[in-house]
Image (cartoon, rainbow, N blue to C red):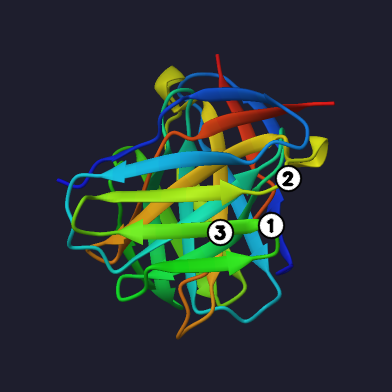
Amino acid sequence: DAGITQSPRHKVTETGTPVTLRCHQTENHRYMYWYRQDPGHGLRLIHYSYGVKDTDKGEVSDGYSVSRSKTEDFLLTLESATSSQTSVYFCASVRGGTDTQYFGPGTRLTVL
Amino acid sequence: KQEVTQIPAALSVPEGENLVLNCSFTDSAIYNLQWFRQDPGKGLTSLLLIQSSQREQTSGRLNASLDKSSGRSTLYIAASQPGDSATYLCAVKSNYQLIWGAGTKLIIKP
């Protein structure tokens, strides 16, 4: 399995506070993704990166920003958390030239 | 807009049975289709990836088929075991992004 870690694994925060989730991979994969998973929905793409400092929006990007200053790290920031952002967040990475996605263990975020 | 559907949402079968999970998609212009497994509280694990030019892929007791013209894929699991209990998700690559189904929760009863 690809070495992908996410931190924190669980977080409870209050509405209006900023939150940053971290994804770290040790596989030197070029592409990285942030998804959210909600009951009754499949995974939905928030943002993705195709290289250092190269990012783009996904299907549900409103209220989220990302940064990738190093190949191994992809950060997801909720500038001002809302209750609708309560979800499980997954990070994934893909080696260039392939399509197989490797997932981290997820971060469960609760916004009160 | 591509939409992916998995029916049923949940399935319970006795151990040892062969079973089929279904995935349907609305737009046949896909690049590939992938099947994943998700265990409770854990991330997703890729099981099989079928390119748009392929009809099926096999890995051990798993066989995935793809019929682009009808917008369908099936995941066949042979001789099911309790360890196969998990949620199975399919995803199609369309417009450079993966579009996901909501998954089928599979329970294998000993």
Q: Local crowd at mark 1 within 10 Å, few (<14), some, or many (≥20)?
A: few
Q: Which residue is mark 1?
A: B61
Q: Please say if B33 is above or below A77.
A: below
Q: Which residue is mark 2?
A: B79
| One can see residue A61 in this view | no
Label 2 in the same subunit as label 3:
yes
| Circle 2: residue type | Ala
Q: Chain of mark 2?
A: B
Q: Are marks 2 and 1 in contact (CB under 8 Å)?
A: yes
Q: Local crowd at mark 2 within 10 Å, few (<14), some, or many (≥20)?
A: some
Label 2 to label 1, Cα distance in Å? 7 Å
| Circle 1: residue type | Arg
Q: Upstream in the sequence, badge 2 or badge 1?
A: 1
Residue A59 in percent (x, y) is at: 28, 46
Q: Quadrant where the N terminus of chain B lies?
A: top left
For the view shown, which residue lies furthest in the top direction? Answer: A112
SS class, disc 1: loop
Q: Upstream in the sequence, badge 2 or badge 3?
A: 3
Q: Chain of mark 3?
A: B
